[in-house]
Image: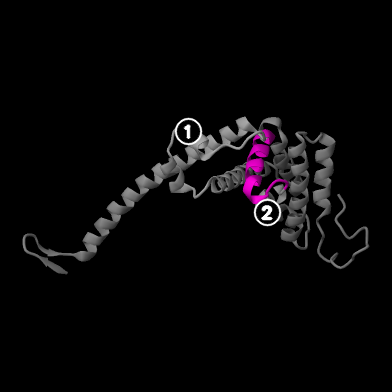
Amino acid sequence: MSENSTSGPVDDTATDDIASRIAQRTLAKRGAAYTSEVRRLLDAALEVMKERGTASRPRVADIVGAAGSSNETFYRHFRSKDALVAALLEDGTERLYGYVAHQMAKEPAPDGKVRCWVRGVFSQTREDIAATTRAVLWNAGAASEMIGATPAIGSARLAELLPGPFRELGSADPVFDASLAAHATFGKLGDYVWSGTEPSERDLRRITEFCLRTIVPAGAEGEAGDPHAARAL
């Protein structure tokens, strides 16, 4: 307790709590404003990059202008344009993760979930989506040499959706099997995205079958050379 000459004893703990609540309210308001600023910059960058495709890379000034923002605001959140592009890649991965997870939740059977996973991942080959993806990856390649590195960008995150159904299907190591399936799938996804083509129904079936064949059932480890070691579709 401390003594105040005009109002009597003051509880320091109580005043600290009040100060903390006021500070938290201020931070919450500022946080909401900052979130809005970042979203405007991300959305503007995506649009500008999509418009330019792989013809030219936009400057920070172009992105700021499209967002109706300022350089000060841009550099408050991103140290460089490369940092913004990295955020775009992460944002796109999270959106895809949410979409695929939602599609998988509709399917009760584990093999059906894997089929939904494959179809969800290859939704990125649709012309409008693929054009944007190519543009962002091309911009990323300017400094980080990420062109052609599609598996490294999204496969690990999307692979997190596969261990559950793989486990139900009898995988002895669902995390490892999921990683194998995801790397192969995203490698093929990169081929389609960069070539501007979409997989046929036959392609999707074959990719799904491949993913299911990566599952090695319990007891089958070490049986290299046995054509029946991997799970048959």
Q: Which residue is under mark 1?
A: 65
As drawn, 25 above or below 50: below
Element on which disc 2 rests: helix
In percent of width and height, residue 90 lies at: 59, 47
Q: Whole-Å distance between the Cαs marked 2 and 1?
A: 34 Å
- Residue 89 within the magenta-colored segment of the rendering: no
Extent of the magenta region: 130-148
- Residue 132 within the magenta-colored segment of the rendering: yes
Dot 2 and dot 1 residues touching (CB under 8 Å): no
- The residue sitting at 51% across, 36% down in the picture is 63
- Please tell me the numbered disc located at residue 112: none
User: Would you say 117 lies left or right of 36 here?
Assistant: right
Amino acid type at mark 2? Ala
Mark 2 vs 1, N-terminal side: 1
Query: Which quadrant of the figure contains the N terminus?
Result: bottom left
- The quadrant holding residue 127 is top right
In percent of width and height, residue 143 lies at: 62, 49
Of the pair 55 and 102, the residue shown nearer to us: 55
Of the pair 121 and 165, the residue shown nearer to us: 121
Task: Give the foreground label among 2 and 1.
Answer: 1
Amino acid type at mark 1? Gly
- The residue sitting at 73% across, 56% down in the picture is 179
In percent of width and height, residue 202 lies at: 85, 37
Tell me the crowding category of disc 1: few under 14, some 14 to 19, or many 20 or more residues within 10 angstroms, Cα based.
some
- The quadrant holding residue 177 is bottom right
Element on which disc 1 rests: helix
User: Would you say 89 lies left or right of 227 here?
Assistant: left
- Please tell me the numbered disc located at residue 156: 2
In percent of width and height, residue 94 lies at: 59, 46
